Image (cartoon, rainbow, N blue to C red):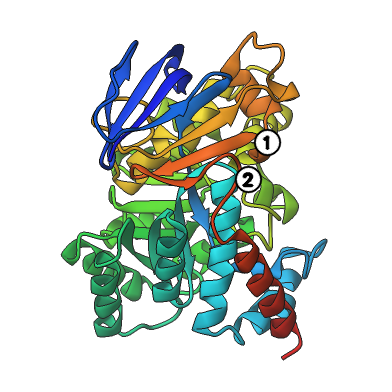
């Protein structure tokens, strides 16, 4: 059964126009005017709505939503070592499944159709994403030494899940040795998997590495063959131009997480202008909800643009169109999926926005309104791979997801 969206405002990073969108199976079949309904098609009235590519959250730790508001307003080191890590040691696979279900619900409700996750119990993350109908790139977080056989088995299990992209998730250069990072890259190559990694998030990280190794972090990673188009590096705040150029030449993508970086005081804004000049693919992420504290990619688009303008004193830096591109087509490129545009042949991962909301009035520039005025609660309907997962603001089983998450979070902090 297909879906026909009639009389809708069609918006992607290229611009906006009126028309119809036909979905056949998991992909967009036609975009045009006066498209005919095929037998069995589900028709959606698009009047008063805009259809956009589903937003792509390229860096998060979904189940950390269980820790939302648990340890706020603390320095990064204290927040991580004294509050977050001790609680994470208590997490069970079922906790992670329940927490990820809550995260998926929040993401669906705010128009995110794909997320790139690094956390414990990867099987539980994948299962939760499948249950809520969201597309996910899933990596089991690797810290210290790891058993290659166990990770390989996990990757094969992930491949069997619907709408799941397998990935390898070495945590960071300060928590995984260079030898193990080399192994992780080789493992991803063998299994045609992505690589998810934290890179240059703080000055302490890059300075400590240089003092220990006698060379820069990006240079060392390149020497061991870690840099490739498979790699999506989260943060990338403390990179110089030479390193940015090196990442771009290797086809690496960077996930910018402005809300988390500001809240935990990473100390510097992403050098987006230099990254753009070197054609480095820059995407957007929320990071975990323990350090954001939400998973709303509309907010991340706005914060990304505002942080650039404020930090560099240039109101023209990082336009609304660029922020929207980062959250859609750039994210799809980073994860190796054919998505991010409203175009025939692209994945039918889309969100319908309610244009009757006050934030869309007046409508001088819809992309500006989407980035600077809208919030996640403007999303009316979400389709992932041709399947409706939210319609008219309602997600099936939402109350159960919320009740389970409340109980699990309460039990976790009391263990």
If the image is split into quadrants, where does the C terminus sit? bottom right
Q: Residue furthest front?
A: 39
Q: Position of residue 97 (x, y in %)?
A: 51, 73
Q: CA distance from mark 2 to mark 1?
A: 8 Å
Horizontal and vertical percent for residue 260?
Answer: 66, 52
- Sequence order check: which comes first, mark 2 or mark 1? 2
The answer to whether the residue labelled 2 contacts the one labelled 1, judged by CB atoms less than 8 Å apart, is yes
Count of number-bearing discs: 2
Which residue appears at 61% of the width and 12% of the height?
Answer: 365
39 vs 335, nearest the viewer: 39
Q: Is residue 70 visible?
A: yes
Q: Secondary structure at mark 1?
A: loop
Q: Is residue 27 above or below residue 182?
A: above
Crowding around mark 2 (Cα neighbors within 10 Å: few <14, some 14 to 19, many 20+) is many
Quadrant of the image containing the N terminus: top left
On screen, 261 above or below 273?
A: below
Counting from the top left corner in percent of width and height, residue 51 is at: 48, 27
Q: Residue furthest top?
A: 364
Query: Where, by quadrant of the figure, is residue 32 drawn?
Result: top left
Q: Which residue is disc 1 drawn over?
A: 375
Asked if residue 173 can be seen in this view, the reply is no
Residue occupying image coordinates x 24% and y 67%: 160
Which residue does the numbered mark 2 point to in the structure image?
296
Residue at 71% x, 84% y: name it: 411
């Amino acid at each position: 059964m297909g879906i026909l969206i009639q009389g809708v405002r069609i918006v992607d990073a290229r611009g906006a126009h009126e028309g119809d969108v036909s979905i056949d199976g998991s992909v967009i079949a036609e975009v045009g005017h006066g498209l005919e309904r095929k037998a069995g098609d589900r028709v959606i009235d698009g009047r008063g709505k805009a259809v956009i590519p589903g937003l792509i959250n390229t860096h998060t730790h979904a189940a950390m939503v269980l820790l939302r508001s648990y340890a706020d307003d603390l320095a990064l080191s204290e927040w991580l070592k004294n509050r977050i890590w001790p609680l994470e040691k208590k997490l069970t696979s079922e906790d992670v499944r329940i927490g990820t279900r809550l995260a998926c619900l929040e993401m669906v409700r705010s128009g995110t159709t794909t997320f790139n996750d690094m956390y414990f119990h990867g099987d539980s993350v994948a299962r939760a994403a499948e249950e809520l109908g969201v597309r996910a790139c899933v990596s089991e977080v690797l810290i210290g030494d790891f058993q290659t056989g166990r990770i390989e088995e996990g990757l094969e299990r992930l491949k069997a899940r619907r709408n799941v992209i397998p990935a390898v998730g070495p945590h960071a250069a300060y928590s995984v040795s260079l030898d193990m990072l080399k192994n992780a890259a080789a493992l991803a190559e063998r299994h045609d998997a992505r690589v998810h990694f934290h890179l240059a998030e703080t000055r302490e990280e890059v300075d400590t590495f240089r003092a220990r190794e006698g060379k820069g972090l990006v240079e060392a990673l390149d020497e061991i063959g870690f840099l490739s188009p498979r790699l999506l590096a989260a943060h990338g705040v403390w990179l110089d131009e030479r390193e940015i150029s090196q990442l771009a030449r290797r086809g690496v993508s960077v996930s910018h997480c402005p809300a988390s970086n500001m809240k935990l005081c990473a100390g510097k804004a992403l050098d987006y202008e230099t990254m753009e000049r070197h054609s480095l693919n820059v995407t957007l992420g929320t990071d975990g909800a323990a350090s954001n504290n939400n998973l709303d990619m509309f907010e991340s688009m706005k914060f990304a643009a505002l942080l650039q303008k404020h930090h560099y004193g240039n109101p023209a830096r990082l336009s609304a169109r660029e922020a929207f591109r980062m959250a859609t087509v750039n994210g799809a490129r980073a994860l190796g999926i054919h998505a991010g545009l409203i175009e025939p042949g692209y994945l039918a991962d889309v969100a319908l926005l309610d244009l009757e909301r006050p934030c869309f009035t007046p409508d001088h520039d819809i992309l500006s309104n989407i980035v600077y005025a809208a919030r996640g609660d403007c999303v009316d309907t979400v389709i992932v791979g041709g399947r409706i997962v939210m319609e008219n603001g309602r997600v099936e089983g939402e109350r159960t997801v919320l009740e389970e998450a409340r109980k699990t979070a309460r039990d976790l902090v009391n263990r």
